[in-house]
């Protein structure tokens, strides 16, 4: 199993310090939130991209891709009924695909609930069609950069669109392109009312990325979720992608979150005999 950590976990740490700590703790993958690079990634040029990639790789980590794609942006919306907004959103996501490719990444996680929630008065069918229209528009950029976008279902506390893996699979099917696949997140799956390991098994053929965390917004093993059946399911379906730690509650401290998450995941693998 390959373990990664999300770069925003380290807050305002210097990049070199964050990379050194992550690698010393056992992580080999680095997942990037674009807002950690620049207020506007369109102004994050070729030299800056190469420098960032080189520094990560020199520290012994691999940039696996991007997440929080539309966070801290304005003017973009996945489910908008406005043709101009949808085109603008597709253009920006295409530029993110270029960024991902330049950094050496291969996957982009599409969550960003505040830029996809369905407003009152719009039907869910309309929202699905609008989202599919945006994703169809970015497939040339995905192909050009050899990048896949992973649609992320999120729990109801995050929003009202794509709350279940089955909803995300519906959207993926509407797009019908091999570069548009599925992301699964433990915190989000905990809201489905179905055993998490069963969701993993049911969606194995579409899943290309995985986030390990807990409904308490901390790292894997730092809450009530038992990761043993989850990791066993990942093993059983021969999942080959990254298992990336994404946290939201930083109260325990960055060092504790990063270190305990890794320890808990390794302990879980040992417990299931892998």
Image: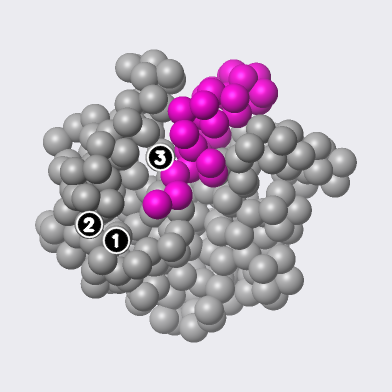
Q: Tell me if label 2 and label 3 are in contact, CB under 8 Å.
A: no
User: Seen in the image, is 32 located left or right of residue 115?
Assistant: right
Q: Which mark is residue 245?
A: 3
Q: For the residue carrying disc 1, how many other residues have a C-alpha within 10 Å: few (<14), some (14-19), or many (20+)?
A: some
Relative depth, front residue between 36 and 49: 49
Which comes sooner in the sequence, label 2 or label 3? Answer: 2
Secondary structure state at the residue bearing disc 2 = helix
Q: Residue at x 49, y 83 (%)?
A: 176
Within the image, what quadrant is residue 189 found in? Answer: bottom left
Q: Could one spot residue 120 in this view of the protein?
A: no
The alpha-carbon separation of the residues under discs 2 and 3 comes to: 17 Å
Q: For the residue carrying disc 3, how many other residues have a C-alpha within 10 Å: few (<14), some (14-19), or many (20+)?
A: many
**Residue 123 in the image: x percent, y percent?**
34, 70
**Residue 19 in the image: x percent, y percent?**
60, 28
Q: Tell me if label 1 and label 2 are in contact, CB under 8 Å.
A: yes
Which comes sooner in the sequence, label 1 or label 3? Answer: 1
Determine if the magenta segment contains residue 22.
yes
Relative depth, front residue between 125 and 52: 52
**Residue 163 in the image: x percent, y percent?**
28, 59
Up the image or down, 122 lies above or below 261; here it is: below
The residue wearing badge 1 is 235
Up the image or down, 115 lies above or below 28; here it is: below
């Amino acid at each position: 199993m390959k373990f990664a950590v999300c770069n925003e976990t380290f807050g305002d740490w210097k990049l070199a310090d964050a990379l050194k700590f992550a690698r010393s703790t056992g992580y080999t993958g680095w997942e990037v939130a674009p807002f950690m690079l620049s207020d506007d990634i369109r102004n994050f040029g070729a030299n800056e991209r190469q420098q960032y990639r080189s520094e990560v790789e020199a520290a012994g980590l691999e940039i696996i891709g991007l997440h929080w794609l539309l966070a801290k942006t304005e003017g973009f919306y996945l489910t908008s009924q406005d043709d101009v907004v949808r085109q603008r959103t597709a253009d920006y996501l295409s530029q993110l695909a270029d960024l991902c490719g330049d950094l050496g990444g291969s996957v982009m996680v599409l969550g960003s609930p505040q830029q996809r929630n369905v407003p009152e008065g719009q039907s869910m069918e309309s929202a699905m069609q609008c989202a599919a229209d945006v994703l169809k528009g970015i497939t040339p950029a995905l192909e050009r950069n050899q990048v896949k976008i992973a649609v992320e279902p999120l729990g109801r506390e995050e929003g009202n669109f794509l709350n279940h893996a089955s909803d995300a699979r519906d959207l993926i099917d509407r797009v019908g392109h091999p570069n548009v696949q599925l992301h699964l997140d433990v915190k989000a799956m905990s809201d489905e009312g179905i055993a998490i390991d069963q969701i993993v098994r049911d969606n194995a053929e579409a899943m290309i990325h995985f986030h390990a965390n807990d409904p308490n917004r901390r790292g894997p093993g730092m809450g009530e979720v038992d990761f043993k059946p989850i990791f066993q399911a990942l093993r059983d379906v021969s999942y080959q992608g990254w298992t990336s730690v994404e946290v939201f509650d930083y109260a325990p401290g960055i060092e504790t979150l990063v270190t305990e998450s890794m320890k808990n995941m390794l302990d879980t693998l040992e417990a299931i005999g892998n």
